[in-house]
Image (cartoon, helix red, strand yellow):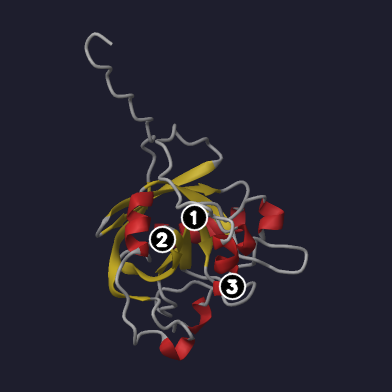
Amino acid sequence: MIRRLALPLAALIAGAALAQTPPVAPPAVAPQPAATVQVTLTTSEGPIILALEKDKAPITTANFLHYVDAKRFDGTTFYRRVKVADGFGLVQGGISQDPKKAFPPIRHEPTTKTGLSHVDGAISMAMNAPNTAQGDFFIMVGASPSMDATATEPGYAVFGKVVQGMDIARKILDAPTDPDKGKANGMGGQMIAAPIRIISARRTSTPIAPTAPAPSPTGS
């Protein structure tokens, strides 16, 4: 059932106004601090490595890890992409509200509480209303702070960030969509024609080492 996974295009479009240039792939990163938990999504297009903020967003991170440890993301897909502009939008994946895979909904953790934001590479929970998020999530391609919580809006629950594999997320953002899928739920043109498989999702502990600088030419 896709209806509960709607995300506000208005928020994304507002965020697009803040993105003057297409986002640039983040540089190689150092090993993640102990405050995060590393998870690798192995997809049919390659791995996406996440650093989850277990201290800043404990409820949402614990929920995501519940699905990871129960292997309920295995065999799911990235099935939706919302492309507002070149290099800007989001890609959505997870259980697609499959009742056989779903755990009970969790309490909403707004960004006003966690201090996190919908930056480029942020991973956040899909939901239709606060306290309804289960096993569907999205990854930001480009920053969209308009999706953060405010004094009057609940926003969406960021709980981590992609630390490796944003090239995969950008590739998914450009995936062809099926114009007929999602029409009944107001998401026509957003559902990926050939969803990208999530082969497995596992906690991983291998540090992500910085890339060594290229050697200088001889004599320089």
Mark 1 or 2 closer to N-term? 2
Extreme residue in the right direction: 151
Tell me the element at label 3: helix
Query: Mark 1 falls on what kind of element?
Result: loop
Residue 167 horizontal/vertical position (percent): 34, 51
Q: Is residue 191 above or below residue 164?
A: below
**Horizontal and vertical percent position of residue 169:** 37, 57
Q: Quadrant of the C terminus?
A: top left
The residue type indicated by label 1 comes to Gly
Q: Amino acid at mark 2?
A: Asp
Percent coordinates x, y for residue 150 in the rendering: 73, 62
> How far is mark 1 from mark 2, CA to CA?
10 Å
Q: Nearer the viewer, residue 120 or 196?
A: 120
Mark with earlier residue (1, 3):
3
**Residue 100 appears left or right of 158:** left
Camera-nearest residue between 125 and 178: 178
Q: Which residue corresponds to the image point at 46% horizontal and 50% vertical from the top-left?
A: 23
| Mark 3–mark 2 distance (CA, rounded to whole Å) | 17 Å
Locate the N terminus by quadrant: bottom left
Crowd band around label 1 with a 10 angstrom C-alpha radius: few (<14), some (14–19), many (20+): many
Toward the top, the furthest residue is 219
Mark yes or no: residue 48 visible: no
Query: Residue at left 53%, top 53%?
Result: 20
Q: Is residue 36 visible?
A: yes
Calculate the distance from the C-alpha at mark 1 to the C-alpha at mark 3. 15 Å
Label for residue 10? Answer: 3
**Which residue corresponds to mark 1?**
142
SS type, badge 2 = loop
